[in-house]
């Protein structure tokens, strides 16, 4: 259920990429299309509720074949992204 809601928010907005995630994207050569593909096709591999809001880790391979994880809270602000290869 959470993945459906995340995907709906991703497609219909609003979506925000945090400053931290933007830096990591630049450092790691990850673009918004990679993140979009992972969010729209991936699976939730972990979740936690460190405060009032849930945080989800979505994992999937990019079109280029890199295994990528995105950390996404329930309000859909991408916090960070990283490759697992």
Image (cartoon, grey):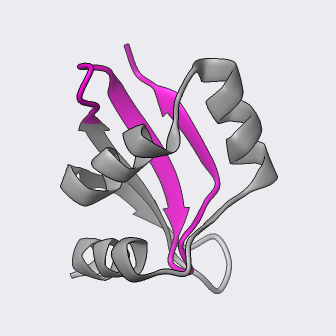
In-image side of 25 versus 76 (left or right) = right
> In the depicted view, which residue is nearer to us: 43 or 9?
9
The quarter holding residue 67 reads top left
Report the span colored magenta. 61-85
Percent position of residue 23, x then y: 76, 35
> In the depicted view, which residue is nearer to us: 38 or 43?
38
Q: Quadrant of the N terminus?
A: bottom left
Which residue is at a point 41% across and 43% down the rendered structure image?
A: 33
Q: Quadrant of the C terminus?
A: top left
Percent position of residue 77, x then y: 61, 67
Q: Is residue 65 magenta?
A: yes
Relative to 62, say whether 71 is above or below. below
The quarter holding residue 81 reads top right
> In the depicted view, which residue is nearer to us: 32 or 66?
32
> In the depicted view, which residue is nearer to us: 42 or 14?
14
In-image side of 24 versus 2 (left or right) = right
Which residue is at a point 63% across and 33% down the rendered structure image?
A: 25
Q: Residue furthest top?
A: 85
Q: Residue furthest bottom?
A: 52
Which residue is at a point 25% across and 58% down the rendered structure image?
A: 40
Q: Is residue 76 magenta?
A: yes
How many marks the image carries: the answer is 0
Relative to 81, say whether 16 is above or below. below
Relative to 42, say whether 13 is above or below. below
Which residue is at a point 52% across and 29% down the rendered structure image?
A: 30
The quarter holding residue 83 reads top left
In-image side of 18 versus 49 (left or right) = right
Relative to 64, say whether 73 is above or below. below
């Amino acid at each position: 259920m959470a993945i459906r809601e995340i995907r709906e928010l991703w497609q219909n907005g609003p979506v925000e990429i945090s400053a931290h995630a933007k830096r990591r994207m630049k450092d790691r050569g990850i673009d918004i299309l990679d993140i979009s593909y992972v969010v729209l096709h991936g699976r939730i591999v972990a979740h936690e509720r460190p405060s009032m809001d849930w945080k989800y880790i979505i994992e999937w391979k990019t079109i280029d074949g890199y295994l990528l994880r995105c950390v996404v809270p329930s309000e859909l602000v991408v916090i960070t992204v990283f490759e697992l290869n």
